Image (tube, rainbow, N blue to C red):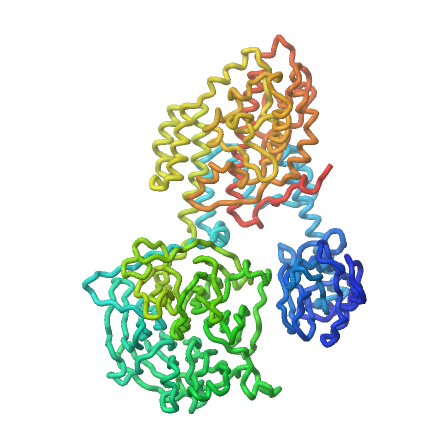
Amino acid sequence: MAGTISDIKKLEYDIHKYSSYSSSYLPENIREDNPANQTSRWSSNTNTPPQFLILKLERPAIVTRIKFGKYEKTHVCNLRKLKILGGLEEDRMMLLFEGGLRNDSVPETFNLKHRTNSGELLPIKYVQIVPLLSWGPSFNFCIWYVELLGIEDSIFILSNLRKYNMLREIEIVRLFLKHCRQQGYVRAFNALQEETGVRLEDDKMTELHEILVNRGDFKKTEEMLIDFIATGLMDDYLARQEYKPQWSLQLTPENEPRPGRRGGHQLIIDPQTSTIYLYGGWDGNEDLSDLWSYDVRTNRWTLIHERSEQLDGPTPRACHKMVYDTSSSQIFMLGRYLDSMSRTEENINSDFYLYNTVTRTWFQICNDTSQVGGPQLVFDHQMCIDVDKQTIYVFGGRILEPKNEEETTGQYRYSGLFSYHISTNTWTHILVDCGHPSASSPHVESIRSRVTHSMLFHHKHRKLYIFGGQRGKEYMTDFLIYDVDTNELSNMTPEKNNADAKNVPQSGFTQRATIDCEKDEIYVLTVSCLLMASYPKALCSVVPALLTIFVLLSFQSLSKEKERRDLNLNSFWLFSLTKKEWSCVYKSEHSNGENCYQKNQSTCHEPCPRYAHQIVYDSTNQVHFLFGGNPGTNSNVRLDDFWVLRLEKPNRDNILRYCKYLLRKQEYEEITKSDPLAAILYLQTKLYDIIDHSDPVQLKEFHKLASLLFKSDSCTAAGGDGMEPTSLLSHSLSGGGGGGSGLTCSNASVGSASAGSVGGVGGGGGSKHKQPPSSIDDEDDRKGEANQAKVMRVESPKAVTTEEADTSSISSMSSSDCSSSQANSSQSQTKAELQDVTAPSSRVLVKPAMDATDLVAPGMGSVKPDATSLSATPSTSRGTGAARNRVADQQFELKIRRCLLFNKLVDLLPESLCQPKKNISDFVLL
């Protein structure tokens, strides 16, 4: 019976190769898991790279996971950074994982990449572990134990090897097809495609190439792109774009009531009516018990009541938590903070309230939840609600005890994970804190509780997500997942787990979180700042539940150890629950000034650093609202500023406008060469309509386009002036830049028409192209060779000039860079031809006349010459030859520019529909 992906087992391996080892710490030691033995490990004899271990499996297998065992104590030689590679051959391996280990005694297991980009299983025989950094930077690397997990069933592996080899063969053929189309080998292209039955790309892409590049039918191309966008072919590209956060101060009329300054308050939102509710907090002098509502649609605050205790509601409080039940329009409230003087036996009770927003009445559900199976009085805990199952979850927080008991023990106690079933009014203690007396029992499940963390409920995944927090002096960076249906607790491990703090958001006080169940994304805003005061109430944190977008917003403050932060630094992070990886969206410094603490903060472009603030998300309008907090400058100062955060991405309208701009820009540039009067009309209508004239960057580009009208091909009439004709192959596409270096090698830019129009004549016949060979010095020869190498392999829409890249402010558009290997291979291939071009006898490499089949693809190299084109041009016909050559050059340039445009457009479409990103030249080095 063939195995399946679920038949995972331990795989046997041998130590195939290693970089070094020290003393008795042999590589073979990693095969035995002995955490109590300090010598049971491999240790390199240096930390100088490259250091590695290569493991060889007994037979090819699908390796899905790798487990690292550890020593029973923390160790400075543990790997803080490492990467893992694998493959069927030891000299051809691909990256399977990159991340790091925590410096503790807990074994860690990581998922390895085990599928190809097309989704097929990937068999490997060799696994290479490459240490990059130890926890002690100056120490050698050590690995204690390695276990490989996967599938090695012979029949199953053989079947997948056949699939893998078949897909590999198809990809090789596609690379050849792409190469043939690039080079203009039409008959070879057709023969190979007919023989193999392999298609280079989807028929839509082939049609797009034919219509745009070969025919130059811009109207039909625009119609095709409109259809592509309408059918969602560019939605994946839009989804991959980064969010751009936009903060704005939400001002309300001065003569209308609004909440005062406070911190440690609570905000929740009714997503159905877009109504925000605010309760309580600490104003710097006393606890509050007022309840406010804010109508998002009318931008108005309403004071529901000033003192809830007078209406059978809760007493004044801060550091409490609330959740909103959309099915009953009720607010549930639990917890509060008490200063040490108020912690008496009669005051320390965990009262539990609900507020009905329809009848506007309070009801005390329970005077003390600890007496009915619920949590003790806590603060800095978190609450979420599962509306479908009518269950509230409460996790973490510090348990408040009478003053004398806390002083006696000197240690804080933390609350575990509880659930409250609304319909039956019953509490369940799901997981106890690891410090609870019962946690040592093998029959009791426990969890490391904490304060100032974040917890959210994903109603589609049916899971709780818990991130960060603090326990004692330890800042916690783990990401816990609790499945509410299976009661399974797990730790999410990012695919690119990196222990380096620079690659993950820093932990801190008062994290704020919301969840997008549709996009499965996490966004993290952190503000590192130096705050001078640390008042207990400032440590309160809140995570509103029932938010549609999971956004973690963490304003970091001074820690309890009075750690100093270097700068006031705002940073916005994204965590993809699908990809399991972090990425930083933006970073910006924020300077605290007097105006940051005034009611009018119009001079600030974002909220000042703070803690004890609150934030909620309005899923209807897709905006966040932030209110108040503690700026940390004075123990009695609190904020009452009200901010709106919008997370913006390009949409279909943006990308359609961008595509139209690219097409119309190219069409306009072509018209200017043949009919300047028609170009003026086109500029005033088609291009004028698509430009955002309020955008300085777009307006500048529009002016550049207008300047093309003053550039003409009149200088190309100098073809009979006695100068030798110069093939475009030995020059850049752009006439500007002095030496014509619009196309350079690795990471350079392919000169666009707009760039060429600024520095010189864009086209094949500019004056820079008419210098006699004797005027070109050795340095220019070398530049010309490098430029030709790029002309031979024009591949990528990213390879544009900086100025042209600026025009993409309509929508961020990018693609892969041209590889330097392309330039190197092309340069060596055409060096002799270049010498012929610049020789006095002037051999031309381009046919006197070209049809559409001679140039059909981007990245084209030299056109295949025939015997006639390689012969020397007689002096009596030099003028006629120059004219023919000039026409050929212009046609060549025209095709190249259309090919560049085609590549830009293709980069916006799904990769599965398009030609391969790589080229044969990437694998050929001479």
Quarter placement of the C terminus: top right
Q: Nearer the viewer, residue 307 or 921?
A: 307
Q: Nearer the viewer, residue 275 or 3?
A: 275
Q: Nearer the viewer, residue 248 or 56?
A: 248
Total numbered circles: 0
Q: Residue visible at 48% across and 49% down?
A: 234
Is 899 situated left or right of 806 in this image? right
Residue 233 place in picture, x, y as percent: 49, 50
Is 84 situated left or right of 690 in this image? right
Residue 287 place in picture, x, y as percent: 31, 77
Q: Residue visible at 22% across and 67% down?
A: 257
833 versus 113 height, above or below: above
Which image quadrant for residue 327?
A: bottom left
Q: Is residue 9 visible?
A: yes
549 versus 213 height, above or below: below
237 versus 528 height, above or below: above
Which image quadrant for residue 16?
A: bottom right
Q: Residue visible at 39% across and 55% down?
A: 591
Q: Residue furthest left?
A: 255
Residue 117 place in picture, x, y as percent: 62, 54
Q: Is residue 465 visible?
A: no
Residue 697 place in picture, x, y as percent: 40, 39
Q: Residue furthest top?
A: 876
Q: Nearer the viewer, residue 80 or 722?
A: 80
Quarter placement of the N terminus: bottom right
